[in-house]
Amino acid sequence: MALKTWKNMLKFPHLVTLILLALLVALLHLTRNNDNLVLVQHQVFLKREQNGTRNDSKIPECNFFSGKWVYDNISYPLYKERNCSFMENDFACERHGRKDLKYQNWRWQPHHCDLPRFNGTALLEKLRGKKLVFVGDSLIRNQWRSMLCLIEPYLTPSTNKTVVLNGTSFYSFHSIEYNATIGLYWAPMLVESNCDDVIIHRVRPRVIRIKSIAEHGRHWNDADILVFDSYAWWMDRTMTVLWGSFGSPDAIYKRVEMKLRRYEIVLNTWSDWLEMHLNRTKTKVFFMSASPFPSGHTMWGTSSSCLKKTDPIFNETYWASGANRNMMRIVESTIEKLAQRGLKVEYLNITQLSGYREDAHPAIYRTYWHTVTKQQLQEYPAVFADCMHWCLPGVPDIWNQILYAYVTRY
């Protein structure tokens, strides 16, 4: 009977085609991913919203991380350096003598969509009664300062804009109007180390308690949004690992190489803490990918190639030499394993888009923790050039625009 039916259908090839198309449409409908976020080859995509409706199958996924820099001196910068009460001298390049300010006017343009423009009021409403904490090293501090500068124009004039240091590691700004806290917890290695004082952290040799994170974690467990980073401080070829407690006579210290392995162990320690202590119904977690830099031998461990750069790199295949792909794969693998255990961490892969911006580093236009004379800077700029951190306004504002897009769409 079935054979006879197919023979009859083959007499009408157009009918067969229509049936096959119908089956294909049905299959696509059944297998369509209705999640707002999709992970494809370690890259996060965010579906665009239309008329406030989420998960519209007619709206293509938006890859915020693939695009180009477009000069835009009309809508950028999003704030003025001199008008930001939260500005830090390390990132205030204009204040420290940089004359070429074009670095402030570049807008990140994704290839197939638009990055939502930052709206501080919308973000502060989202944070009403909540706590956002950035955790990590000086690059996450760079991003935290950027976030405070971004929201400042949306605060009332009477707002107390004081940043408070609690203990030795936790900076916080609290908006009474929104009952919202935006904090920075200094933990450059994520786990406990002898570098955990936010002010006095230039300690050598660096010592880490590779399996100990609880002391840090108790400062995070009440946060509603956590944004982590940890990369640049792991570039040392060797590091001292401590088994036991600081100051304990039974402690064992061992100098180790194995950069990738020690990084992997620490991320496993971090992921275990999240799995055991995170309130999954309350807290959203983000991990920033490596902030790239060119490798070299300045006092920052970078090259001095950012000196006198005035334009972005437009070759989309460019990859900063200091961005270690193997270390990034360890982060991606750790996040994938967490997802398999039912814990979602959003990986914001800002590495390549940031790597194009060698023009946006402070170079010699910043403060130093020790005395550096103008003559020294003029004679030996390559020694002192900071090609790791970022001028503000600048690249971290784009990181925060992307973070804003994720936070406000939940």
Image (cartoon, grey):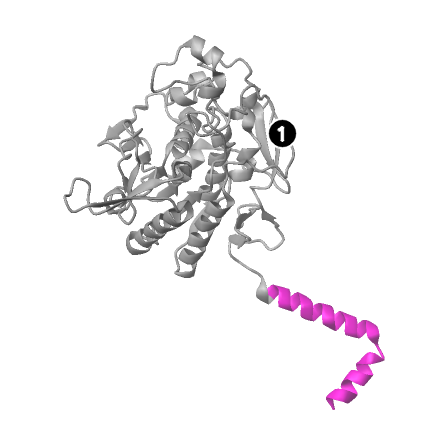
- Residue 133 included in the magenta stretch of the image: no
Q: What kind of residue is marked 1?
A: Val
- In this view of the protein, which residue sits in the foreground, 189 or 18? 189
- For the stretch drawn in magenta, the main secondary structure is helix
* Residue 338 screen position, x and y as percent: 40, 56
Q: Is residue 76 visible?
A: no
> Which residue was labeled with disc 1?
70
Q: Is residue 258 above or below residue 364?
A: below
- Residue 27 included in the magenta stretch of the image: yes
Farthest right residue in view: 11
- Residue visible at 23% across and 44% down in the picture: 215
Question: Which element carries disc 1, helix, strand or loop?
Answer: strand
Q: Is residue 151 visible?
A: yes
- Quarter of the image where one finds residue 321: top right
* Residue 148 screen position, x and y as percent: 39, 28
Farthest left residue in view: 249
* Residue 224 screen position, x and y as percent: 34, 44
Q: Is residue 336 above or below residue 180?
A: below
Label 1 neighbourhood size at 10 Å, few (<14), some (14-19), many (20+)?
few
* Residue 374 screen position, x and y as percent: 43, 9
- Residue visible at 42% across and 38% down in the picture: 235
Q: In the picture provided, is 328 more to the left or to the right than 271?
A: right
- In this view of the protein, which residue sits in the foreground, 409 or 375? 375
Q: Which residues are magenta?
A: 1-29
